[in-house]
Amino acid sequence: MRKVLSILAVLWLTACQSQENKVLPSIVPLSAKDKQVVRVMPNNVIGEVEPIYFPPMKSPFLSRIDTGAASSSLDARDIKKFERDGNRWVSFTIVNRETGESHTFEKPINRKLRIKRVGDDEHRITVEMDVKMGGEKFVADFSVNTRDDFDYQTLIGRNILSGRAIVDVSVSNTLK
């Protein structure tokens, strides 16, 4: 049995060394000697920052991908709650910092979300937004609030990522 295992190990090592193009996972940084290495990115691997669209807006929002966040968040201006047909609604404006494009949305309030913060919890309202991420279009829950203190206008959390994507923080802008 030991001889069989030894032979299999030798054959496996020989086969590994004879490959002309090495394929390394994308998380392995390329060294100077690996110029010929082919990087393979599976379709469902996304980076730490990705473009996200909110139709009918035409310009993308660079979004922070955060596996530590349970929910997603969207930078909104002029947030006004109101009542329509006995239901709670909200109007808000999204302005793309990069392009200046803006659009005002009116959405039913989906729920109130408690955000845990150090020393103080925060309550935010959430709405369902149409989203285009890569080639996929879907509806997702976003909290709407001002994100002036953040580099990115949107944060994509696990409510969108679960079952949809694997995050590789060594890359960015893998989606088109």
Image: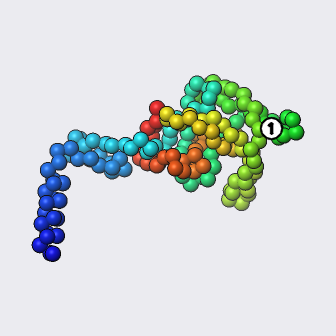
Q: In this view, does 53 lie to the left or right of 78?
A: left
Q: Position of residue 124 (x, y in %)?
A: 74, 47
In the foreground, 39 or 31: 39
Residue drawn at 46 percent across, 32 percent down: 176
- Answer above or below: position of 47 versus 106: below
Q: Dot 1, how many residues are within 10 Å of its Cα: few (below 14), some (14-19), or many (20+)?
A: some
Secondary-structure class at tag 1: strand
Q: Can residue 89 be seen in this view?
A: yes
In the foreground, 64 or 157: 157
Residue drawn at 12 percent across, 66 percent down: 7
Q: Is residue 102 left or right of residue 67?
A: right
Looking at the picture, which amino acid does disc 1 mark? Answer: Trp
Q: Position of residue 30 (x, y in %)?
A: 29, 46
Residue drawn at 29 percent across, 49 percent down: 24
Q: Can residue 149 be seen in this view?
A: no
Residue drawn at 46 percent across, 36 percent down: 175
Q: In this view, does 82 lie to the left or right of 22?
A: right
Q: Position of residue 71 (x, y in %)?
A: 63, 49
Occupied quadrant, residue 99:
top right
- Answer above or below: position of 58 versus 175: above
In the foreground, 96 or 12: 12
- Answer above or below: position of 162 versus 61: below
Q: Mark 1 points at which residue?
A: 89
